[in-house]
Amino acid sequence: MSSPSSTHSAVVTLTGHLMDTGILARVLDDVLEYGGDYRIDRLDLGRQHQDESRALVEVSASEPELLDRILMRVQVHGANAVDPGTATTRPAPSDGVFPEDFYSTTNLETLVRLDRDWLRVQQPEMDCGLVVTDGPVVRTVPVSDVRAGDAVVCGAHGVRVELPPQAPRGDEDDFGFMSSSVSSEKPQALLVRQIAERMREVKAAGKRVLWVGGPAVVHTGAAPAMVRLVQAGYVDVLFAGNALATHDIESSLFGTSLGVDLAKGSGVPHGHEHHIRAINTIRAAGSIAAAVETGVLTGGVMHAMVQAGKPFVLVGSVRDDGPLPDVITDVIDGQRAMRAELPDVGFAIMVATMLHSIATGNILPASVPLVCVDINPATVTKLADRGSAQAMGIVTDIGLFLEQLARELAPE
């Protein structure tokens, strides 16, 4: 393009497989979409597939505030200012409110320069602010949790992001089947074996496996397979809503899910009452754990989680019946409870739930591999559309998938 006439500009640099991945094109598109202009100062293309490319791009805008917003936007793709300067902080004006020009975070690994030192941001998360505390320490904070007077990083100066390692075209590793965002036609058994191997590696490295599940785990008859995975140590934490736990408990107490006999696949008399009677039983016991301890609940996924001493976070929605006493009904409190379980998570697998998958994807760092398994390809597509670029999906029946995975990791 021709040299921009505006006076406010900065040079950004990108490194990686810029052409194969389309990153350079996305950066340039975003600059124009946000009302800026650009000039490519230098483009060094790798000669071999394994070689990285490097680009220097001058980005300009009519106003310094607009330039800052563009620079923050292109950081989503790993574009960092060549001369980032040092970070500016301003006090939060009141509880639950950032300064107007706050830095809006990505889920990429992020560093902030205060004075002369670069500090790594704790637990990167998208759509948050950066708060500096004594130490100094920089952490992501959602707008609902910022407090008046907190030192909030403002503008794009002094902030750098790091892209996860990129596999060059034709040189994918053993998890390379995930190179397409949604897989529906690749060999199912191979995909399951590769996921199982990745989970073994994560556990061997001392990291935790996070599961996010929906009620179809129970409806499809896959709960026994899930129980085996819990007992084998491959479910370290579970995120779900009221429905998965309710129908899992209904299945244990009555042998039905949504009133359908799981052994026969047909409805039973008064079966439509079973889920609310299951909820009432647990409410009378006081909690899921109390029901297990008193012998009221003797089987199912939730029983296995309690028996294994593994944490679960159940967050409700406006459509819930009951809900179960363990369900967090304030969604902001639910988000906080979910965030508290993310340290040391090295792998996330999401099965048959759209809303909880998107919610979890929004709080996970991009460095955590994320696999979404659903019969509906739109679920993983929506995850990626909402910023979880690391989300990769397998389109299949969740019952068959969980049974195959349990055979790999927890053979009977």
Image (tube, rainbow, N blue to C red):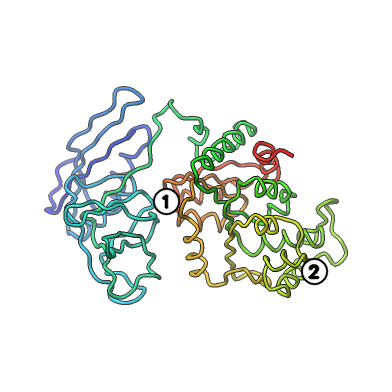
Instruction: Give the number of callouts.
Output: 2
* Residue at screen point 36% across, 53% down: 106
Residue indicated by mark 1: 365
Dot 1 or dot 2, earlier in sequence: 2
Percent x, y for residue 396? Answer: 64, 42
* Residue at screen point 65% across, 69% down: 320
Q: Nearer the viewer, mark 1 or mark 2?
A: 1
Q: Is residue 9 left or right of residue 334?
A: left
Which image quadrant is residue 303 in? bottom right
- Check disc 2 and give the amino acid type: Glu
Distance from disc 1 to disc 2, alpha carbons, whole Å, reads 41 Å
Percent x, y for residue 376? Answer: 61, 47
- Check disc 1 and give the amino acid type: Pro
Q: Disc 1 on helix, strand or loop? A: loop
- Residue count near mark 2 (Cα–Cα under 10 Å), binned few <14, some 14–19, many ≥20: few
Q: Is residue 11 left or right of residue 17?
A: left
Residue indicated by mark 2: 273
* Residue 330 versus residue 121 in the image, above or below: below
Which image quadrant is residue 315 in? bottom right
